Image: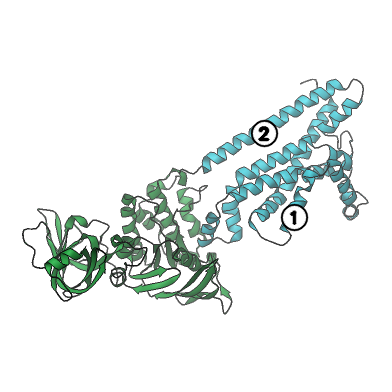
Amino acid sequence: MIELDVALKVGTFNLEMAFRNDDGITALFGHSGSGKSLTLNLIAGLMRPDRGTITLDGRVLVDRARGIFVSPPRRRIGVVFQDSHLFPHLTVRQNLWFGRWFAPSRERAINFDAVAETLGIGKLLPRYPAKLSGGERQRVAIGRALLCCPRLLLFDEPLAALDMERKLEILPLIERLHTEFAVPIVYVSHATEEVARIANLVVVLNAGRVKAIGRPGEVLGPLGGESGWSRFDRVSVLTTKVCGANTAYDLTELKHPSGTIWLAGRAGPPGGQIRIIVRATDIVLSAGPPHDLSVRSSLSGQIGSIEKDGPLAVVEVILEGEGRLYAITTRHALDELGLDRGSRVFALIKTSALDERQAAVTPLSF
Amino acid sequence: MTDLSPAEWTAIWLSLKIATAATIASLPFGILVAYALARWHFPGKMLLNGAVHLPLVMPPVVTGFILLILLGRKGVFGAFLASIGIVLSFRWTGAAVACAVMGFPLMVRAMRLSFESIDRRLEQAAGTLGANRASTFFLISLPLAAPGILAGAILSFAKALGEFGATITFVSNIPGETQTIASAIYSYTQVPGGDASALRLTVVSIAISLVALLASEIVQQRAEKRLASFE
C-alpha cells in the first residue's frame, strides 16, 4: 500500500498532492509539466518534499515533521526510467545483477530465470547496452528494477521513447509483472490508452494538483474539454467477458450487459475478463437498432449528458447494466436524429478500431 | 642508443622512477579532489580549486621554494617528518613530491571533466537499485571515468618527466639521487663537450613521451569504444 501526502515548491512550480492505493497499478496521469515525474522522484527519494509524508506498506519513508527521510538505497523501490539508464560499462547480466546484489538475500524472492524468461532477455545477457535496441534496453531496465526485489516499482514514461510496435510489446509485460511477481506499481504517463489499459487507480494531475482520482473508466471519460486535452484523448473503459469465438472469421465475442463487442483475432479463454478501451472518436451513435451496416458491435443505453463543443458534442451514454461510454459526434447529427438527454441510443463500435492497444487481455485484479 | 653512458642511464632510470612514483602517489588524491570538485558542494570549494591550480600558474621555482620551506629538513612539516625518519629534501622522493605537485592540476583537470561528463542519472539509478554512495562511486562513477582518469595520470606522468624548475629548487641536481633527464640535460649544456650527451638524452626524452602518449591514446580509444553509446 502506498500513501502519499506531500508539497514541494520548485522555482515557481507548486506541487501539492495526496493519494493512496492499496494494491495494483497506480497511474499518475497528466501533461508534461503537471508534476507527475516530480511525484515519482519524491517517491523514489531522488528529491525531498518541503512538507508531508510518504508511506509504503506501513513503513514511513518520508515524514518532514518528524525529520524522517529514508535514502533511495534503503527504500527498495525499483525505478524504470524513460531512457533506461542502463550502466554502459556493464553487460546485460551485470546490469541485471546490480540491484539483486544489494538486496538482502532473504528478500530475493524474485527468481532471476523467471524474470529473464518473462521479459525475453535471456539471449541478451552477454551483450553490452550499446548493442541493444530501444525495446531491448527497456526490457532489461525493467528486469534490473524488478530483480532487486523491490517493494514498489516506479515507471517514468517507460514507453515514451519507443515506437508503437515496441510499446505493444512492452505494455503487456508490465501488466504481467504485476500479476506474476506481485509487485505494486506506480506508472507515470501522459498517454490515455496506456493508462486506461493497465491502471486500476488513475490520479489525474494538472499544474501540480490532483484533478481527479478514481478508476480509469470513471476518471478518463469525463476528462477533456479543458485546455490541453484533445477529443482524441477522450476514452471510455469497459469491462467485458469473453463468451465465445467465431473461428471461421477469427473473431472473439465479448459480452457486456448492454450488448456484444467483436474483437479481431483470438483473445483469452472463455470466461476471462477483457478491458476494452474505446476512443470517443471511434463510436457511432444510432437512434434505432443498426440495419445494413458493417458495424457488428453495438451497445445500448441512454444519453446521460451532452456537452457541446463548437460544431461537435460529447455525448455520455449510460449503458444498460453498468458503465458509460463517451461518443463524439456533430451537433448537426444530434439535432437531425432528435437525440437529447434521456434518449435511447445504440453505440456502435468498429471492430477494426480496436487493436492490441485497446484490449487488455491479462485479467487485472480489481 | 647503445652508447649511452652509465650516468645517462642513471638519469633516465631516475626520471622514470620519479615520474612513476609521483603519478601513483598522487592518483588517489587526484581522484578524490576531482570527484569532490565535480560532484560535491562544500564551503571553500573555490579555494580548493584555486589551490590545486596554483602550481600551473606560479613560476615553478616558486613552487619549489615553497616546498623547501614546508618540507625541507628545517621546514614547517619537514622538521616533523625528519623526526620520524622521512627526509624529502635532496632525495629522489622529494623530486617525486615536486613532480606530483606540479602535475596535480593537470591530473585533476582531466579527471574532473571526466566525472562531470558522467550522466548523474546513472548514479541516481544505482542509488535506487540499493547501492550506497561508496558502492556507486566504485562500481559506476570510477569505471565510467576511467578514460579520463587514465588521461589525467598520463598527463601527470608526462609533466613529471619534464619537470625541472620546482625539482631543481627543492631537491637540487644530484647525479644518482635527484638528477632527472631534464636536469641532466641542463647540466650537460653547462659543460664544454656535453652537447652530445644532451642530444642523446633529448632523443630519449622525446621517445619516452611519445610512447606514453601513444599508450594513453590506445587505452583511451579502447575504453571509449566500449562505452560508446548507440544513439
For this view, does B12 lie left or right of residue A37?
right
For this view, does A67 lie left or right of residue B42?
left
Say above or below: A252 vs B157. Answer: below
Please state which of residues B80 and B101 is positioned toward the viewer in this rendering: B101
Q: Residue A244's quadrant in the figure?
A: bottom left
Taking the image as drawn, is residue B53 in sight?
yes
Say yes or no: labels 1 and 2 on the same chain: yes
x and y, in percent, of residue A196 in the image = 30, 65
Say above or below: A266 vs A207. Answer: above
x and y, in percent, of residue A290 in the image = 8, 63
Tell me which residue sits at (43%, 67%) in the image: A152
Query: Residue tagged by mark 1?
Result: B48
Identity of the amino acid at label 1?
Answer: Leu
Taking the image as drawn, is residue A259 in sight?
no
By what rule are the colours in the image chosen?
by chain
Q: Residue B99's quadrant in the figure?
A: top right
Please state which of residues A341 and B2 is positioned toward the viewer in this rendering: A341
Answer with mark 1 or mark 2, whichever residue precedes in sequence.
1
Say above or below: A284 vs B185. Answer: below
Secondary structure beneath dot 2 equals: helix
Q: Chain of mark 1?
A: B
Residue extending farthest to the left is: A292
Judge the density around disc 1: few (<14), some (14-19), many (≥20) Cα neighbours within 10 Å. some
Label 1 and label 2: CA atoms lie apart by 29 Å
Please state which of residues A203 and B202 is positioned toward the viewer in this rendering: A203
Say above or below: B7 vs A129. Answer: above
Q: Colour of chain B?
A: cyan
Q: Colour of chain A?
A: green
